[in-house]
Amino acid sequence: METVKIQNPDMAWQIAADILFPPDFDRSKRYPTIVSVHPFGSCKEQTSGNVYGAALAKEGFVVIAYDASFQGESGGQPRWIEDPTQRVEDISHVIDYAVTLPYVDSDNVGVLGVCGGGGYALNATLTEKRIKAVVSITGVNIGRLFREGFSNYDPLGALEAMAAQRTKEARGGELQINELLPADPDVARKSGMTEIDVFEATEYYKTTRGQKPGGATRMLFSHAQNTLGWDAFAFAEMLMTQPMMVVIGKKVGAFGAYRDGMEIYGRSTASKDRQLVELDGWSHYDLYDKPEPVAKALAKLVPFFNQHLSSRQAAS
């Protein structure tokens, strides 16, 4: 593995990324490459890198797992901004970097995203045609989620509160940093936050199971307006032309990955090869790192990438 800092002329900051290499990697050869996109409130060292990224590297792909702008080890101020437009642009910035590397086959670049990263990966694929295939793992349309559960189904009220808070901060007031999850599973139980997605997110992010220094489950409240006006799937019927795989667990939770997966699959009628993988008995956060559901997902997505990133069979 190699850790790099990506500087793009469009940005005043750098993106931190880990490049994971296949076994017997040879820099004189060119390899199909997959950009791996982490969830909302996550970082590159969690499921996008240490689970799916590592597994895909073992299968012969170069994988670039990176931290979103304003998050993890990447630059950008103020911290913990979740801006879908920037998150999608980050994918293009990472591809800009990847295609300069002599060992990357620039004609065979794929993208994989998990949770919110799955929504971002799908959205990027609509307009970023250097992406030749995309896989969403329990992907969530973060705009839809913010307009619904994350705003208590009051998006206009949330926008008014964000506007007032942003004015306060512009005048020198303290930043409002929202913690997205209970402190630990015990706190979640005691406070009655036992809905499956909320509780299992806490089990993942707030215990040694998934906790990492860069995975700050926080959000700068005043800068989230764009999220409420964003739709991961806008114009999918027209623009999703590349091969697409959507992996979802059939144990449904409040964050809505199942419904979002069904929606994007149904709408992507222009895709050259759209595939829906439904996993019985598994939940959103099971697909982050549980060995059995992850293995089931990999059994589908590895052949999918092998098929559509054609240089996989013979790096040259």
Image (cartoon, grey):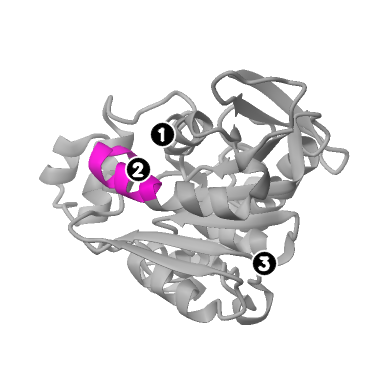
Q: Position of residue 230 (x, y in %)?
A: 60, 68
Q: Name the residue at the right extreme.
A: 9
Quadrant of the drawing holding the N terminus:
top right
Q: Crowding near pointer 2: few (<14 within 10 Å), some, many (20+)? A: many
Q: Amino acid at mark 3?
A: Leu
Find residue 257 and report its horizontal and vertical position in percent.
37, 63
At x 63% / y 21%, what residue is drawn? Answer: 25
Is residue 291 inside the magenta stretch? Answer: yes
Residue 126: numbered disc: 3
Q: Amino acid at mark 1?
A: Val
The magenta stretch is 289-299
Q: Nearer the viewer, residue 140 or 19?
A: 19
Q: For the residues marked 2 and 3, what is the alpha-carbon distance in whole angstroms?
A: 24 Å
SS under mark 3 = helix
Considering only vertical position in the picture, is 214 above or below 262? above
- Point 44% across, 58% down: residue: 139
98 or 82: nearer the eye? Answer: 98
Q: Residues within 10 Å of mark 3 (few under 14, many from 20)?
A: many
Q: Is residue 246 magenta?
A: no
Q: Is residue 77 visible?
A: no
The answer to whether any part of residue 25 appears in the image is: yes
> Mark 1 = which residue?
51
* Side of 222 where 315 appears, left or right: right
